Image (cartoon, helix red, strand yellow):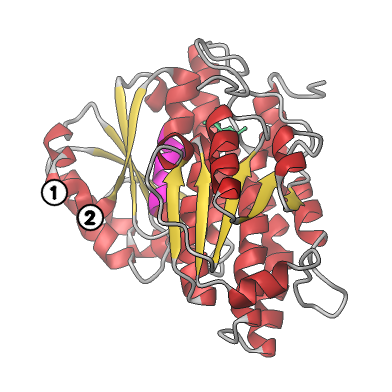
Amino acid sequence: HKGEHRHFMAKEIHEQPKVVGQTLAQYIAPDGTIRLPAGVDADLRTVDRVSIVACGTSFYAGLIAKYWFERYAKLPVEIDIASEFRYRDVPFGAGNLAIFVSQSGETADTLASLEFAKTHGQRVLAVVNVQTSTMARSSHIVMPTLAGPEIGVASTKAFTCQLAILLCIAIAAGRSRGVLSAEEERSLVRTLAEIPDYMARALELEPKVHELAREIARARDALFIGRGTNYPLALEGALKLKEVTYIHAEGYAAGELKHGPIALIDKGLPVIVIAPYDATFEKTMSNMQEVIARGGRIILLTDERGASLAASSGCSVLALPDMPPIVAPLALAVPLQLLAYHSAAIMGTDVDQPRNLAKSVTVE
Ligand code: M6R
């Protein structure tokens, strides 16, 4: 049940520090290294490519993981939406590991893609939340997210738990492929252990998010932009908002703004800019200035350092503490979820059961 919360979505957002901590704890060994299920290390050492396949929010978790596999393991990643993957002429190679990501483990297109990969002799690893699901039973390796039952149709805690697992796999891959040294691995693992605290700090932004949600609740459209891992987060922020408020929202890579969506900018269009202080911060700031110059209304989701650099821009700022890069996507997801939730709660929509949506999509 919902406990002190009005909706399951709120409860599930608040559970995240705990369930992400549990999910990570499964794979952090007492010696401060990552320990994956038997056989996975050997797989990761020998593969030359990873395929990630999923739908919806689970797909966005995969998109974020692509950046991690490239950075920490120098492994090429091919990622696709399950409803596309299953109908493509995928050139499956011998040295491929196929990863399927799903909360329910019953999504029809993801399951069909999994069978398609198995038919082509692929090793199949599933990151699933429902451990009794068809997907869990059909995979060679299962790495469960320990999010607990997710009732709200909008996925929240399953998403961040998926990120936690994918991060563990990417770091372990880096180590077993000799890209990361033992010391680098230990240092990343120490940072992993801090993720729940950063997520708890992100939850403290809730009153401020609620204020900003009043503005979103009046908007007809919204745009989310970011670069690097903030780009899939922009897609996820937009998906969350449209699912629960029915406001038309789009996520874009910030660099794509000039290639079309900037035509939409006017006073009535809130633009949520996701930009902690990282290697792409300055670039995203110049995109933000372009929006401001055209009368656009900005909500900047950043960290302390980013907030101090953007102080003179006059936009609304949501600032998290400064955080290591691997923490950022998990912590930044929280205010985006809260923004969607509070906007919907203000508008009075059916937050946990939005119209036309089902919790698991078992038809194609
Ligand atoms: O159960 P799955 O993770 O396979 O579901 C995939 C999507 O249907 C799901 O993430 C959907 O997009 C959510 N409603 C997003 O909040």
Ligand 1: which quarter? top right
> Taking the image as drawn, is residue 209 in sight?
no
Looking at the rendered structure, the kind of residue marked 2 is Gly
Q: Nearer the viewer, residue 85 or 283?
A: 85
Q: SS of the residue at dot 1?
A: helix
Q: Where, by quadrant of the figure, is residue 353 drawn? A: top right
Residues packed near mark 1 inside 10 Å, few (<14), some (14 to 19) or many (20 plus): few
* Residue indicated by mark 2: 255
Q: Judge whether residue 233 is colored magenta.
A: yes
| Position in image of residue 13 (x %, y %) | 66, 36
Between 208 and 244, the one nearer to me in the picture: 244
Rendering coords of residue 155 (x, y %): 60, 33
Residue range highlighted in magenta: 231-238
Q: Which mark is residue 29?
A: none
Q: Quadrant of the N terminus?
A: top right
Q: Secondary structure at mark 2?
A: helix
Who's the residue at 71% across and 24% down the image? Answer: 151
The main secondary structure of the magenta stretch is: helix
Q: Residue at x 78, y 48 (%)?
A: 18
Looking at the picture, tell me which residue is in the foreground, 3 or 109. 109
Which of the 4 quarters of the picture holds residue 172? bottom right
335 up-or-down from 349: above or below: below
